């Protein structure tokens, strides 16, 4: 029997707000432990939550970008469970009436067609703190310390809808994650840096016989630290389930963990062990009312979405559709291009230099674009100098490398290194004459009107000038010496 | 009559005229505490040194002739479930026996900013769960009118302190009657404001949708004076309401002429002590004689109030009390150090008293999968019906008068073994919490030396009516 795979993500995204969801504490990453805490986010007796308007705006913005209905009224609920990183013994989340419902995200499907993956809901909730164990797990540790800096940082949970255009393959799953992350980065609700826990994936997988309606039992995989882990976990889990059903076994509903070492999924808890969270409306928080003006205002303040950006790169700057797609993958790169383009005539060269040269440097240093030390003004200056032939491509690469490392301007690097091309005809003429004298055979061929040694002679002039000779002028000078070809 | 036996209003006058200093008043209060506290046990913590310092400041303020608040220099006691920065706040529980809050509750901050002198933190039923102050981890409080009897609860310490002259004013909290019942049993005035009138920030939650902070004092006027200070919107509590802030002292003398008083028939049924019923009827006759109209009304869903109250309150409590896990503050058991679950179990088993554990279990059950709709949802529906009864009644009347308690103060141990008997003591008070309405207790006579309380329930945010009717009644009876 053949089976269809059904993949359904639950993704937690940390919102980019300056303060926490229910108190005024800072949210800066990497602060010393418990430096960003107060009575509210450490669950002191008597403290009460006060909702951040900014977080609601960002959640609604994400909802709009993912084509959701924004509920006119929404409620917070308490999810009750005990864990040392959860200071109140419950997480303030949403259960009934989340902020956003019934949306979709369009991705490129396996058959190359646009495919609108259903999104069931997006809700707003608070993050928990972080445990620091004295050994590598809670169980093995003599003690554990708790850092509440993360406690109360706003998260949105984006839950896909397995009944409306679910993902059907690992490749589609990857496209979904990438497109979702790109979209959220574009509208600036989150930086979505996975390593910092700003984009966390749980995923549900089930199989059903091709053409059948009812879904098979699903397993949920938690603890996925990277996109690669997601892909590996999915591949393993799909294979595991397939082997099970094909050998006449059953898939049981359970939660599994992905073992980062062995790259396999392992059981965590069964359906029977699933905790009863005893959700109920949080009486400390009043109902949220989203009126039309609020939603409209959020919509008007929503930054450009990826597809709008691609279209603008093509229409306004004449970038090829292919280059536009590549540039737009990262909003910061697309913005960098747009900023450079204002000062650059040769936009083809500009896009190529970004895609080839700048990408290479960013990748080598694994630096995100927004931390890149090259300013758009300097980068466009460099491209202009290359386009005008003031420096060669090769020198350009060297200059860019130094710009990337030190943040210095191309002007200063060129002057310092004496890289500026020699364009003085007298100086270059002398060099050409010397090279001709040194290579009588080539010279004689030139004299006979043969173009074959031109390249060789240019190379020799370059060698003599440490590569600083203006290649176009040298070429012209050599070609001037071409004799007329003997007839026949 | 000693200084500590005067009303806050009288003391404020004396302070202004220079007839007494805050220091003298404060010393008088502590002298009374020294005399009586061994018997009464109204306080879990007294703050003598802090109080004397605050009294000095208050006196300096008067000397410099600065415009001083009416509360300036007046002693106040605060229930031990309101956070006081740097001062131990136990909530009457072993699980918080060593908890020192890093911040002040909004109501506390307000009274201190107004120059009030903090006498100490008053005894209470653990986590405000109880109607007799017998459930305190720090021993029961005794009724100053007769130490054989309970003072009512859960704000029993606050009521007893005011009644005994161990404080002039007090702050309590009321979730199902916890200000009004002890006020009635100790023969003082207690007011539960409209839900949202006073910020709950810093009030250690029992049941968030029902909890409200309220004043206790010896006169309606003193209650109004304190309510003036603690009420108002607070950005730290989103359930506090940005309502018109009244001057409750301004409406004291408006009298009851033309006021329509509702008398709900469901409150005068079997189970009500006949002598209490007689006292209430006598009070109504007097009010009627002074121009008020008494109208029979019906609140048909009253019978559902106590059961829905105990479901909603315990459900919320089961979640509110989850934070007491021994991780960050308070008591942590020496047992159960193997893993986190064992630590929670040992800490919570040892740290909480039996009534608290009973309510956590009830509430956890009510919220559990498969039971939620039958209990929690149903209780919320009943709550809506109870509230609708009041809405309808208030179309016809300005306020409603009822007994506070179906029985007189009872003896220690009389009801503690029978939780259900204890729960029924709240039968006349819980409806106002379910409906979010303001309600006040005033003293209405005595039976065998034990006080009888009368409850006045008002429309939402119409505390003025309570103060007006309550003060008029005091004037008629010569109680104030």
Image (cartoon, coloured by chain):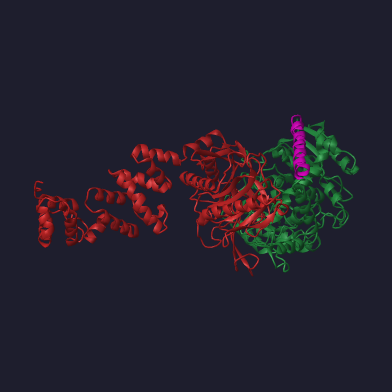
Chain colours: A red, B green
Q: Answer yes or no: is residue B171 visible.
A: no
> In the image, which residues are magenta?
B371-399
Is A123 magenta? The answer is no
Residue at x 8%, y 48% (from the top left corner): A486
Q: Quadrant of residue A422?
A: bottom left
Side of A434 where B25 appears, left or right: right
Residue A112, position as x, y percentages in the image: 48, 40
Does B442 sit above or below residue A151? above
Residue A402, position as x, y percentages in the image: 31, 59
Q: Nearer the viewer, residue A183 or B328?
A: A183
Give the residue at the far front of this rendering: A488
Q: Which quadrant would the N terminus of chain B be assigned to in this image?
A: bottom right
Specify the principal SS of the magenta part: helix
Q: Nearer the viewer, residue A178 or A451?
A: A451
Residue B47, position as x, y percentages in the image: 68, 62
Q: Quadrant of residue A142?
A: bottom right
Q: Which quadrant would the C terminus of chain B be assigned to in this image?
A: top right
Residue A463, position as x, y percentages in the image: 19, 61
Side of A119 where B391 appears, left or right: right
Residue at x 81%, y 44% (from the top left corner): B307
Residue at x 82%, y 34% (from the top left corner): B300
């Amino acid at each position: 029997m053949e089976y269809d795979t059904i993949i359904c993500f639950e993704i937690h995204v940390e919102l980019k707000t300056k303060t926490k969801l229910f108190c005024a504490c800072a949210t800066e990453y990497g602060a010393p432990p418990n430096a960003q805490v107060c009575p509210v986010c450490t669950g002191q007796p008597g403290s009460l939550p006060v909702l951040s308007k900014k977080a609601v705006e960002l959640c609604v913005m994400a909802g709009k970008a993912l084509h959701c209905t924004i509920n006119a009224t929404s409620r917070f609920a308490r999810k009750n469970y005990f864990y040392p990183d959860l200071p109140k013994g419950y997480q303030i989340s949403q259960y009934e009436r989340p902020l956003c419902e019934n949306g979709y995200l369009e991705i490129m499907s396996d058959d190359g067609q646009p495919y609108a993956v259903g999104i069931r809901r997006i809700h707003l909730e608070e993050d928990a703190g972080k445990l620091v164990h004295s050994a590598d797990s809670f169980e093995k540790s003599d003690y554990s310390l708790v850092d509440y800096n993360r406690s109360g940082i706003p998260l949105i949970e984006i839950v896909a809808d397995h009944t409306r255009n679910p993902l059907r393959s690992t490749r589609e799953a990857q496209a979904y994650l990438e497109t979702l992350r790109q979209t959220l980065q574009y509208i600036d609700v989150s930086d979505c840096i996975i390593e910092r826990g700003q984009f966390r994936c749980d995923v549900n997988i089930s199989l059903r016989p091709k053409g059948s309606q009812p879904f098979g039992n699903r397993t949920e995989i938690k603890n996925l630290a990277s996109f690669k882990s997601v892909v590996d976990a999915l591949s393993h889990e799909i294979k595991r389930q397939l082997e099970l059903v094909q050998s006449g076994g059953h898939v049981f509903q359970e939660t599994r963990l992905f073992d980062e070492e062995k790259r396999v999924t392992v059981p965590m808890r069964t359906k029977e062990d699933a905790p009863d969270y005893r959700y109920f409306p949080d009486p400390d928080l009043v109902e949220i009312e989203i009126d039309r003006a609020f939603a409209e205002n959020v919509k008007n303040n929503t930054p450009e979405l990826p597809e709008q950006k691609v279209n603008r790169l093509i229409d306004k700057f004449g970038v090829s559709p292919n280059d536009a797609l590549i540039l737009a993958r990262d909003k910061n790169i697309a913005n960098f291009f747009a900023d450079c383009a204002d000062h650059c005539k040769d936009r083809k060269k500009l896009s190529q230099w970004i895609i080839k040269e700048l990408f290479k440097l960013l990748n080598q240093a694994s630096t995100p674009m927004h931390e890149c030390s090259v300013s758009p003004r300097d980068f466009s200056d460099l491209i202009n100098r290359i386009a005008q032939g003031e420096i060669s491509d090769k020198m350009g690469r060297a200059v860019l490398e130094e710009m990337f490392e030190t943040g210095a301007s191309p002007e200063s690097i060129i002057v310092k290194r004496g890289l500026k091309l020699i364009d003085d005809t007298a100086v270059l003429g002398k060099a050409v004459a010397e090279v001709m004298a040194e290579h009588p055979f080539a010279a004689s061929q030139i004299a006979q009107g043969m173009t074959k040694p031109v390249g060789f002679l240019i190379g020799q002039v370059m060698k003599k000038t440490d590569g600083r000779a203006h290649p176009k002028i040298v070429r012209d000078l050599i070609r001037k010496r071409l004799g007329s070809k003997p007839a026949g | 009559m000693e200084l500590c036996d005067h009303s806050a209003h009288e003391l404020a006058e004396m302070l202004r005229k220079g007839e007494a200093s805050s220091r003298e008043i404060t010393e008088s209060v502590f002298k009374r505490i020294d005399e009586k506290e061994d018997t009464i046990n109204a306080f879990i913590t007294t703050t003598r040194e802090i109080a004397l310092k605050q009294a000095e400041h208050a006196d300096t303020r008067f000397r410099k002739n600065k415009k001083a608040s009416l509360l300036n220099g007046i002693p106040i006691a605060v229930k031990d479930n309101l956070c006081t920065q740097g001062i131990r706040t136990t909530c009457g529980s072993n699980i918080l026996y060593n908890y020192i809050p890093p911040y002040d509750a909004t109501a506390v901050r307000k009274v201190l900013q107004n120059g009030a002198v903090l006498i100490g933190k008053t005894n209470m039923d653990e986590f405000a769960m109880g109607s007799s102050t017998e459930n305190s981890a720090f021993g029961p409080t005794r009724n100053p009118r007769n130490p054989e009897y309970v003072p009512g609860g859960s704000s029993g310490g606050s009521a007893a302190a005011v009644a005994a002259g161990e404080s002039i004013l007090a702050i309590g909290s009321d979730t199902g009657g916890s200000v009004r019942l002890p006020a009635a049993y100790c023969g003082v005035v207690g007011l539960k404001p409209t839900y949202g009138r006073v910020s709950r920030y810093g009030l250690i939650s029992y049941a968030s949708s029902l909890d409200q902070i309220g004043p206790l004092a010896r006169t309606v006027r003193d209650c109004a004076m304190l309510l003036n200070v603690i009420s108002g919107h607070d950005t730290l509590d989103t359930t506090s309401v940005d309502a018109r802030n009244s001057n409750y002292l301004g409406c004291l003398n408006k009298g009851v002429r033309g006021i329509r008083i509702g008398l709900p028939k469901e409150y005068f049924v079997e189970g009500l002590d006949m002598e209490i019923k007689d006292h209430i009827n006598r009070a109504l006759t007097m009010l009627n004689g002074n121009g008020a109209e008494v109208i029979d009304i019906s609140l048909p869903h009253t019978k559902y109030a106590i059961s829905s109250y105990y479901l909603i309150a315990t459900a919320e409590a089961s979640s509110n009390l989850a934070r007491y896990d021994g991780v960050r503050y308070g008591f942590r058991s020496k047992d159960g150090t193997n893993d986190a679950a064992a630590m929670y179990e040992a800490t919570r088993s040892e740290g909480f008293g039996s009534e608290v554990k009973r309510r956590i279990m009830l509430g956890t059950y009510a919220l559990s999968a498969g039971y939620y709709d039958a209990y929690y949802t149903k209780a919320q529906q009943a709550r809506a019906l109870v509230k609708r009864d009041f809405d309808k009644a208030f179309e016809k009347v300005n306020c409603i008068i009822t007994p506070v308690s179906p029985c007189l103060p009872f003896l220690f141990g009389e009801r503690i073994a029978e939780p259900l008997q204890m729960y029924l003591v709240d039968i006349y008070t819980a409806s106002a919490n379910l409906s979010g309405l303001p309600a006040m207790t005033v003293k209405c006579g005595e039976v065998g030396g034990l006080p009888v309380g009368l409850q006045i329930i008002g429309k939402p945010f119409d505390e003025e009516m309570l103060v007006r009717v309550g003060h008029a009644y005091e004037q008629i009876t010569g109680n104030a």
